[in-house]
């Protein structure tokens, strides 16, 4: 079978696509990835075919993201968020789509697997005359389907069955719809109309899922909030874990043997321009603790970018091998990215999560709801906040117990062997 996988030029969106492509290739499927040139080397090292996005849907988007991150040292305002969301998701849609059409002529795939935010697949799915391949949505953020309690996606509201709380959720949903969802939907509908296609069936990122033939969520059912209606096309497939690569500091095993607790801290590979947001307060808050070993990871940035002195109980690494380190970890501190959290929980490690933008409140709400960690609702936690949260997790074994329950479920959750939605084509 020929499988084309598609991703926008963002690392957190690309990584699950690369893992999925590797799994398919190892299962003897012919695979290709349609994405940014910044990922060419990673793709070609796995001997998977690389197909580049059009320039405006690649470099143009990357320039916009870099400019946005440079401008906004703290959480941006609504106007700027909408502007960058339109620039990243909506504006490249037609270019992505036309590039996809050309790619499918060159590489006639049986299946297209597209991550949550690859909007260029929408015109293909909306075109009734399209002789298209099967479409598989691969979630790289928490599910965008309608929740049972009517809460909107974004603010990270916890599930509730209380009637009064549900009224509050409904009001929050109206606000989010009017201020965030509808402007993006209208902008996308205008572009679709220009090429003679009907409007979206629902909000933008939800449409990518509901239009697909199959929805694959690289997670487990227990980590997702209850949905309004059962979705037969939805399958939970467990974690898409990358092949291990990177450093494995010898100090970790030594510290573990000595009975010290291992604390990992990372800001990921995108929100790591200012390592003073999470790495520094962690080191400052826990740096005097001889019972702990801190591993501070920079996501590729120079170690010197950490804006504080590395204490005697701290080691730093640009790229550690999480697959070998997480089994020894006692706590992971991170911005609550979906991939980071699901990978960490698949190893049964409880978390301290922070950050208030992007999908982080939604991911962090799930950490809170499952009892697998503590959410610090700030982009810049203070050292004492980090210290108190880590102490609480280490003092209460129920956090580790819940994380281990998640790990056992991850181990048992796998992709179904048959796919009726795809086999119909």
Image (cartoon, helix red, strand yellow):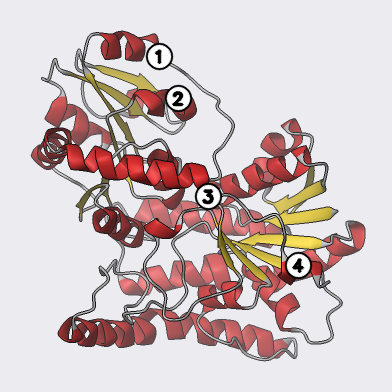
**Disc on the earlier residue, 4 or 2:** 2
| CB-based contact (under 8 Å), mark 3 and mark 1 | no
Q: Relative to the observer, which residue lies in front, 152 or 311?
A: 152
Q: Nearer the viewer, mark 2 or mark 3?
A: 3
Q: Give the foreground label among 4 and 3.
A: 3
Give the label on residue 413, or none: 3
> Could you say where residue 265 lies in the image, as x and y percent from the top left?
30, 33
Q: Secondary structure at mark 1?
A: loop
Q: CA distance from mark 4 to mark 3?
A: 20 Å
Q: Crowding at label 1, few (<14), some or many (≥20) Cα neighbours within 10 Å?
A: some
State the mark number for residue 425: none
The alpha-carbon separation of the residues under discs 2 and 1 comes to: 8 Å
Task: Tell me how far mark 4 sits from mark 1, CA to CA.
Answer: 44 Å
SS label for mark 4? helix
Q: Which of the marked residues, 3 or 1, is nearer the chain's N terminus?
A: 1
Residue 372 screen position, x and y as percent: 27, 47
Q: Work out which quarter of the rendered image holds the C terminus and state it.
A: bottom right
Disc 2 designates what residue? Answer: 320
Q: Earlier in the sequence, mark 4 or mark 3?
A: 3
Mark-to-mark CA distance, 3 and 1: 31 Å
The reply to whether dot 2 and dot 1 touch (C-beta < 8 Å) is: yes
Q: Is residue 311 left or right of residue 111?
A: left
Residue 372 lies left or right of residue 36; in this view the side is: left
Whether residue 272 is visible: no
Q: Name the residue that disc number 4 marks.
A: 422
The x and y percentages for residue 97 are 74, 70
Task: Say which residue label 1 marks.
Answer: 249
Disc 2, SS? loop
Question: Marks 4 and 2, Cα distance to the nearest angstrom?
Answer: 37 Å
Count residues near mark 4 (Cα–Cα under 10 Å), then give few for <14, some for 14-19, many for 20+.
some
Q: Between tags 4 and 2, which lies in front? A: 4
N-terminal-most mark, 2 or 3: 2
């Amino acid at each position: 079978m020929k499988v084309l996988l598609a991703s926008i030029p963002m690392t957190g969106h690309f990584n699950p696509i690369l893992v999925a492509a590797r799994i398919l290739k190892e299962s003897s499927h012919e695979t290709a990835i349609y994405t940014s040139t910044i990922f060419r080397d990673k793709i070609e090292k796995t001997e998977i075919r690389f197909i580049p996005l059009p320039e405006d849907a690649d470099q143009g988007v990357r320039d916009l993201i870099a400019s946005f991150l440079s401008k906004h040292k703290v959480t941006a305002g609504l106007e700027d968020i909408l502007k960058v969301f339109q620039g990243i998701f909506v504006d490249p849609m037609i270019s992505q789509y036309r590039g996809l059409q050309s790619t499918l002529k060159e590489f006639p795939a049986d299946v297209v697997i597209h991550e949550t935010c690859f909007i260029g697949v929408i015109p293909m799915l909306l075109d009734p005359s399209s002789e298209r391949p099967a479409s598989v949505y691969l979630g790289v953020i928490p599910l965008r389907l309608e929740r049972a309690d009517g809460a909107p996606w974004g603010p990270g509201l916890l599930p509730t069955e209380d009637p009064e709380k549900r009224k509050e959720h409904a009001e929050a949903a109206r606000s989010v719809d009017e201020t965030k969802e509808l402007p993006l939907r209208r902008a996308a509908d205008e572009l679709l109309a220009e090429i003679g296609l009907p409007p979206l069936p629902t909000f933008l990122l939800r449409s990518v899922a509901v239009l697909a033939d199959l929805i694959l969520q690289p997670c487990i059912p227990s980590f997702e909030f209850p949905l309004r209606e059962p979705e037969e096309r939805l399958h939970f497939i467990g974690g898409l874990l990358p092949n291990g690569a990177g450093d494995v500091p010898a100090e970790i095993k030594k510290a573990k043997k000595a009975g010290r607790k291992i604390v990992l801290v990372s800001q990921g590979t995108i929100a790591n321009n200012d390592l003073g947001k999470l790495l520094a307060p962690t080191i400052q808050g826990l740096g005097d603790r001889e019972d702990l070993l801190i591993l501070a990871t920079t996501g590729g940035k120079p170690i010197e970018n950490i804006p504080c002195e590395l204490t005697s109980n701290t080691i730093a690494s640009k790229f550690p091998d999480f697959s070998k380190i997480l089994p020894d970890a006692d706590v992971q501190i991170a911005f609550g990215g979906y991939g980071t959290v699901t990978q960490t929980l698949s190893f049964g490690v409880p978390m301290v999560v922070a950050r208030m933008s992007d999908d982080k409140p939604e991911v962090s709400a799930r950490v809170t709801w499952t009892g697998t960690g503590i959410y610090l609702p700030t982009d810049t936690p203070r050292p004492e906040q980090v210290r108190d949260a880590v102490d609480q997790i280490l003092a209460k074994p129920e956090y580790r117990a819940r994380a281990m329950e998640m790990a056992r479920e991850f181990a048992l959750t796998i992709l179904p062997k048959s796919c009726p939605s795809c086999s119909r084509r």
